[in-house]
Image: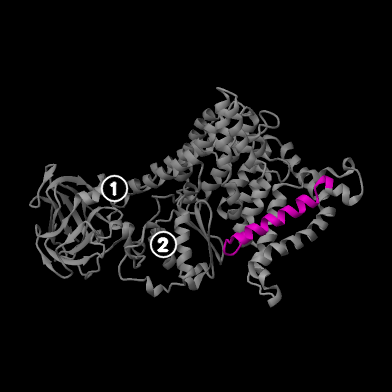
């Protein structure tokens, strides 16, 4: 049952994703109307309202498509058919005809039969029929109607029966929903706060979307989003279930992220700062909070409960003050700006002031909780040698991009096709159904680049990727559909971002040996932190330096042996006699060029001295392809290094300029 509702929560996001288009049109129309309330303003608003008035239909189609096993368009068509039957058979005029009575005597609930609740129900029934009958084979005489063509026909028959049931059941059900909605509305600001608190607590399960449908759409008569965008209802009340999110998502959570950064250990601050900055920007600008929330949701769950409480407090206070603004997607800057000119927005600028206060509350609240209870937020957790040594080892090809590489790492870490039942995703997370979540390698999943993970139960796993999750999900689905054996992916080397594999070398290290590193070209020296690629600048592969070359003659940085020439020729691996493993990576994102600019002059196993020519590189071809040309020199087995000494070098270097000395442990 939990799995079913999680899938439902994810499916509801598909029609919700259409709402930004409506908000953009309506919001732009309002802004235009402030200057000239003429044809263009009304035209834009009409376009947005055309979407809003069809929300129940969108939910029917979107839910059917999202809940179908293979997301086939036949399921969406069945959802459309399933929705049209009850909404037409049970509309007020039709019910009056069926009952042989006057329209005025028909129960008023039938005037609201076309609503999101009916849309979701129709979509669920259509999806269930699709999943059960889309491969059904009929006798030869009826074979045209077999398989997927059968599903919309069955949807029409089933929904006609459902309509007969709704004729009796819908009035009391509708009135019960209205009573529930009125109860929450009757609680005023307290009810808004309770909703927001529960909304955040349900985020880990993904069921917050189901809760949202009650308050934000026309399930219980509240319809806060629809009424706000249509500027209907009492000013200062419509929008009360949305406004309090803006101070949290735009100000509170980013301030909480700063508190997490401030409490990280010094050696982890740069790594944590990058994670927190990306999450804070997503929260502020778009209102997508999962990358931030999942970074501390499980490792410091008391902090997440505090966050849920602060969100409820913000919602209740905004409702109490009757400060309102609205959104279509989420409470970020984009939706906030679009709502400013909506005539039903009430003192929306005061939400900025509330946001500043919430930022103070979040920062000091998070800071106190982290220190008082020693919460293991990102950057404070202990890292064991076992964690450092474990590796996600996969094989890649020159066709792989960063998403497919991450998908391969996750595929291996969760046990491959033998342990996967279904692959799905929502806005920011992979939603996986596995046969046994105890078989996954959690550390390996995190090292794949995932923000975090949530093991819900024995079979359900969420992996937080971020807003680019769709590309990872597509790649993972392809691996699963192909039932690719793990033996095809597992390798003795670790794959890093940008298709860089750690050179496979002898692991023996000679102790207390100092190796000298030289520039790999004539050009300008760069600190590795200044490279415009987070994989290198954050030292995810290891420490080192970079050279911006003047010409394409690239030389060996050390004395040693060539251990790896990558198939795409953009990278070469070396090993020193002391056992240090060196990666020379030529350019940024140049794996995509498939070796064309590179004329490599060395082969695997070849002995080299520093200054020996290892490649001629067409720098202009790299630039013409829109790529950058820094030559990165990285020590990839930093665990073997006891001391790094960077020599004072001039900005301009040659292949004879000694840049670095590295001493083994």
Q: Is residue 317 visible?
A: no
Label 1, secondary structure: give it: loop
* Numbered range of the magenta stretch: 67-93
Residue 250 in the image: x percent, y percent? 50, 37
Q: Is residue 233 visible?
A: yes
Q: Is residue 80 above or below residue 261?
A: below
Name the residue that disc number 2 marks.
443
Q: Nearer the viewer, residue 71 or 116?
A: 71
Q: Quick one: which residue is furthest to the front in this view?
A: 141
Number of residue marks: 2
Q: Residue at x 18, y 69 (%)?
A: 604
Q: Quadrant of residue 232?
A: top right
Main SS category, magenta section: helix
Left or right of residue 560: residue 98: right
Left or right of residue 649: residue 258: right
Q: Which mark is residue 544?
A: none
Label 2, secondary structure: give it: helix
Name the residue that disc number 1 marks.
626
Find the distance from the CA under tag 2 to the CA under tag 1: 35 Å
Q: Is residue 83 magenta?
A: yes
Q: Quick one: which residue is furthest to the right in this view?
A: 100
Q: Quick one: which residue is furthest to the top in this view?
A: 35
Check contact, mark 2 vs mark 1: CB within 8 A. no
Q: Residue at x 60, y 28 (%)?
A: 39
Q: Residues within 10 Å of mark 1 (few under 14, many from 20)?
A: few
What is the quadrant of the C terminus in the image?
Answer: bottom left
Q: Nearer the viewer, residue 596 or 656?
A: 596
Residue 107 in the image: x percent, y percent? 86, 45
Name the N-terminal-most of marks 2 and 1: 2
Q: What coloring was used for the rendering?
A: one colour
Residue 545 in the image: x percent, y percent? 20, 50
Q: Nearer the viewer, residue 361 or 135?
A: 135
């Amino acid at each position: 049952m939990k799995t079913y509702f999680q899938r439902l929560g994810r499916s509801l996001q598909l029609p919700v994703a259409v709402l930004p288009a409506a908000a953009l049109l309506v919001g732009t129309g309002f802004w235009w109307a402030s200057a000239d309330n003429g044809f263009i303003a009304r035209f834009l608003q009409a376009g947005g309202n055309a979407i809003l008035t069809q929300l129940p239909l969108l939910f029917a189609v979107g839910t059917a498509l999202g809940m179908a096993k293979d997301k086939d368009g036949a399921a969406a068509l069945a959802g459309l058919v399933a929705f049209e039957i009850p909404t037409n058979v049970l509309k007020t005029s039709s019910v009056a005809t069926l009952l042989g009575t006057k329209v005025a005597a028909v129960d008023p609930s039938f005037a609201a039969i076309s609503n999101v609740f009916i849309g979701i129900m129709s979509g669920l029934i259509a999806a269930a029929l699709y999943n059960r009958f889309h491969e059904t084979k009929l006798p030869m005489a009826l074979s045209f109607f077999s398989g997927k063509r059968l599903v919309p026909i069955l949807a029409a028959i089933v929904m006609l029966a459902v309509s007969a049931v709704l004729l009796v059941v819908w009035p009391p059900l509708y009135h019960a929903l209205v009573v529930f909605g009125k109860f929450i509305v009757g609680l005023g600001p307290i009810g808004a706060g309770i909703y927001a608190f529960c909304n955040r607590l349900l985020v880990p399960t993904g069921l917050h979307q189901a809760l949202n449908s009650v308050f934000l759409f026309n399930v219980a008569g509240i319809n806060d989003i629809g009424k706000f965008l249509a500027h209907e209802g009492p000013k200062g009340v419509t929008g009360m279930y949305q406004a309090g999110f803006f101070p949290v998502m735009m100000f509170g959570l980013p301030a909480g992220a700063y508190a997490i950064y401030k409490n990280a250990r010094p050696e982890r601050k740069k790594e944590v700062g990058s994670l927190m900055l990306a999450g804070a920007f997503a929260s502020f600008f778009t209102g997508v909070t999962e990358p931030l929330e999942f970074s501390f949701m499980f490792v410091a769950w008391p902090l997440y409960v505090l966050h849920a409480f602060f969100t409820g407090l913000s919602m209740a206070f905004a409702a109490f003050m009757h400060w309102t603004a609205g959104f279509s997607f989420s409470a970020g800057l984009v939706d906030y700006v679009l709502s400013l000119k909506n005539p039903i927005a009430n003192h929306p600028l005061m939400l900025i002031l509330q946001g500043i206060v919430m930022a103070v509350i979040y920062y000091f609240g998070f800071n106190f909780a982290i220190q008082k209870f020693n919460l293991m937020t990102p950057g404070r957790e202990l890292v064991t040698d076992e964690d450092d040594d474990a590796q996600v080892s996969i094989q890649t090809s020159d066709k792989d991009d960063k998403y497919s590489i991450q998908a391969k790492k996750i595929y291996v870490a969760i046990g491959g096709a033998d342990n996967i039942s279904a692959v799905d995703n929502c806005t920011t997370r992979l939603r996986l159904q596995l046969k046994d979540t105890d078989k996954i390698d959690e550390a390996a999943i995190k090292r794949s680049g995932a923000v975090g993970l949530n093991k819900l139960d024995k079979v359900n796993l969420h992996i937080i990727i971020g807003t680019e999750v769709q590309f990872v999900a597509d790649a993972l689905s392809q691996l699963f559909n192909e039932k690719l054996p793990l033996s095809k992916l597992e390798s003795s080397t670790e794959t890093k971002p940008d298709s860089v594999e750690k050179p496979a070398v002898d692991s023996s290290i000679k102790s207390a040996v100092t190796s000298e590193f030289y520039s790999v070209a004539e050009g300008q020296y760069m600190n590795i932190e200044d490279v415009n690629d987070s994989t290198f600048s954050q030292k995810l592969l290891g420490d080192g330096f970079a050279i911006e070359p003047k010409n394409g003659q690239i030389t060996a940085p050390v004395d040693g042996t060539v251990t790896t020439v990558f198939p795409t020729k953009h990278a070469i691996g070396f090993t020193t006699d002391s056992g240090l493993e060196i990666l020379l990576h030529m350019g940024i994102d140049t794996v995509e060029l498939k070796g064309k600019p590179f004329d490599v002059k060395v082969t695997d196993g070849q002995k080299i001295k520093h200054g020996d020519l290892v490649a001629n590189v067409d720098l202009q071809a790299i630039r013409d392809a829109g790529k950058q040309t820094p030559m990165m020199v990285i020590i990839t087995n930093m665990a073997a290094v006891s001391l790094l000494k960077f020599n004072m070098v001039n900005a301009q270097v040659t292949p004879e300029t000694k840049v670095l000395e590295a001493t083994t442990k």
